[in-house]
Image: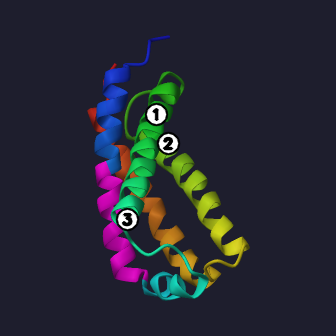
């Protein structure tokens, strides 16, 4: 069993973060009007520099986590796109569970979350494919 290349996990994780953040921003802008409309009604934080950096740090952690997961399951599934897709789907499940919490507490209506949750599946898979392409042991 080969060792995980931690430098590659960090670098590919940062790239994964950038790709995911970009795709998420585009999709939220394109189809997130219901979510944006619901936000003021539940007194969510107004966008600020602090909130931006907090969310960015979460995305960085998520991207690195996804690449760590890819590196960890790579010996079992083999290198390549299939393993990256499995990783992306696993990442999407984690993200969707967190998103579903917002709906379960009725902070945001389910109808506002479902489209964003659905579009996040291809986003996490594409971001993971890009990161996995960079990862080498």
Region in magenta: 18-32
39 shown above or below 89: below
Query: Which of the labelled discs sits on residue 87, or is there none?
Result: 2
Circle 1 sits on which residue?
Answer: 70
Residue 24 at what x, y percent from top left?
37, 65
Q: Secondary structure at mark 1?
A: helix
Q: Is residue 118 above or below residue 130?
A: below
- Callout 3 environment at 10 Å: few (<14), some (14 to 19), or many (20+)? some
Q: Is disc 3 in contact with disc 1, using a CB cutoff of under 8 Å?
A: no
Q: Does any portion of residue 83 appear in the rendered image?
A: no
Going from N to C along the chain, the mark reached first, 2 or 1, is 1
- Looking at the rendered image, the disc whose residue lies closer to the viewer, 3 or 2, is 3
User: What residue sits right under mark 3 in the picture?
Assistant: 24
Categorize mark 2 by other alpha carbons within 10 Å: few (<14), some (14-19), many (20+): many
Q: Identify the residue at horizontal 40%, vertical 29% (top origin).
A: 79
Quadrant of the frame with the C terminus = top left
Q: Compare marks 3 and 1 and give the one earlier in the sequence.
A: 3
Q: Which mark is residue 117?
A: none
| Residue at disc 2, secondary structure | helix
Is the magenta region chiefly helix, strand or loop? helix
Q: Are marks 2 and 1 in contact (CB under 8 Å)?
A: yes
Residue 118 in view (yes/no): yes
Percent across and percent down for residue 11 are 29, 33
| 94 or 56: nearer the viewer | 56
């Amino acid at each position: 069993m080969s060792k995980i290349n931690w430098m590659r996990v960090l670098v590919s994780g940062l790239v994964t973060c950038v790709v995911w953040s970009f795709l998420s921003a585009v999709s939220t802008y394109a189809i997130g009007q219901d979510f944006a409309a619901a936000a003021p009604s539940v007194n969510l934080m107004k966008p600020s520099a602090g909130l931006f950096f907090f969310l960015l740090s979460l995305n960085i952690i998520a991207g690195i986590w996804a690449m760590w997961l890819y590196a960890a399951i790579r010996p079992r599934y083999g290198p390549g796109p299939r393993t990256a897709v499995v990783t992306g789907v696993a990442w999407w499940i984690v993200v969707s569970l967190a998103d579903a919490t917002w709906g379960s507490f009725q902070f945001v209506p389910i109808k506002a979350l479902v489209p964003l949750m659905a579009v996040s599946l291809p986003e996490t898979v594409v971001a993971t494919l890009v990161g996995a392409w960079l990862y080498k042991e």
